[in-house]
Image: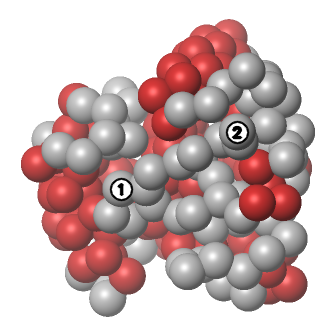
Amino acid sequence: MGLELKYEYGQTPISEEEKEGLLIKTISTQGELNEFEQNNIEDAVVWTLKRKFKLNEILSEKFICDVHKKMFCDVWGWAGKFRKTDKNIGVDKFQIAIELKYLFEDCRYWIENKTYSEDEIAVRFKHRIVKIHPFPNGNGRHSRLCGDILISHFFKRPVFSWGHKSLTFKSKTRDIYINAVKAADHNDIKPLLDFARS
C-alpha cells in the first residue's frame, strides 16, 4: 500500500512520480507525513534564526531553493528542486526560473523606491512566490517562511503571525488565508496583508 494523501481545498496534489521521492518509506498516512514535514520545518526555522541573510542573498534563486531544501530535505528527495510537472496552480514549469528573476527585480525596485510599506513588500514577495509555485509541495509554507525572512532579516521587523495557527489543516483560519491569497491573485493585497499580522 502506497502513500494515501487527502488534500484540503487549495492544496496542490502530488503526482505519483513525486510520491516516489518520499524518503521515509514507513509513512503511509497524511497525518504521519504532516508530522515529519513539521519537524523538518521546525529545524529549518532554527536554521534561519542562526543565520544573517543579506538582501542579495534573499533575492536569489539559490536562496529560494535552499530554504525549501532546509524545510523538506528529511522527507522528500526533491526538496529544493523545481517541479518538473505542471500543477493546477502556478506558472508553467519552464517559466519558474524566469518568473522568480522578475520577482527579485520587482522586489528590489519596491525597496529602492519605497513603493510599499515594509510589511507589504514582504507579503507581496511571499504571494508572488506561492503564485509561481516553484516546488511539487510545500509552496505555501515555504513562501510564508521566505516572507518572514525578508521582514526580519532585511527590514528588522518581527516575523508575521499568519493567523497564529497551522494552515495545513482545514480550519476557519485556513479558509481566511486561502481567500486572502485568492484576493491577492486578483490584485487585492489588503486581505493577505491584514492576515499576515492577525
Mark nearer the N terminus (1 vs 2) = 2
Tell me the kind of residue under disc 2.
Answer: Met
Q: Is residue 194 toward the left or the right of residue 162 in the image? A: left
Q: How would you rate the neighbour count of disc 1 (Cα within 10 Å): few for under 14, some for 14-19, many for 20 or more? A: few
Query: Is 96 rendered above or below residue 1?
Result: below
In the rendered image, the quadrant that contains the C terminus is: top left
Q: Name the residue rendered at 37%, 82% in the picture.
A: 185
Residue indicated by mark 1: 8
Tell me the kind of residue under disc 1.
Answer: Glu
Query: Is 3 rendered above or below residue 28?
Result: below
Q: Name the residue rendered at 65%, 59% in the picture.
A: 14
Query: Is 61 rendered above or below residue 190?
Result: above
Number of labelled discs? Answer: 2
Where in the figure is residue 194, as x and y percent of width and height? 17, 55
Residue indicated by mark 2: 1
Q: Look at the image and tell me whether residue 192 can be seen.
A: no
Q: Is residue 43 toward the left or the right of residue 152 in the image? A: right
Where in the figure is residue 75, as x and y percent of width and height? 75, 29
Between 18 and 28, the residue placed more toward the observer is 28
Q: Look at the image and tell me whether residue 4 can be seen.
A: yes
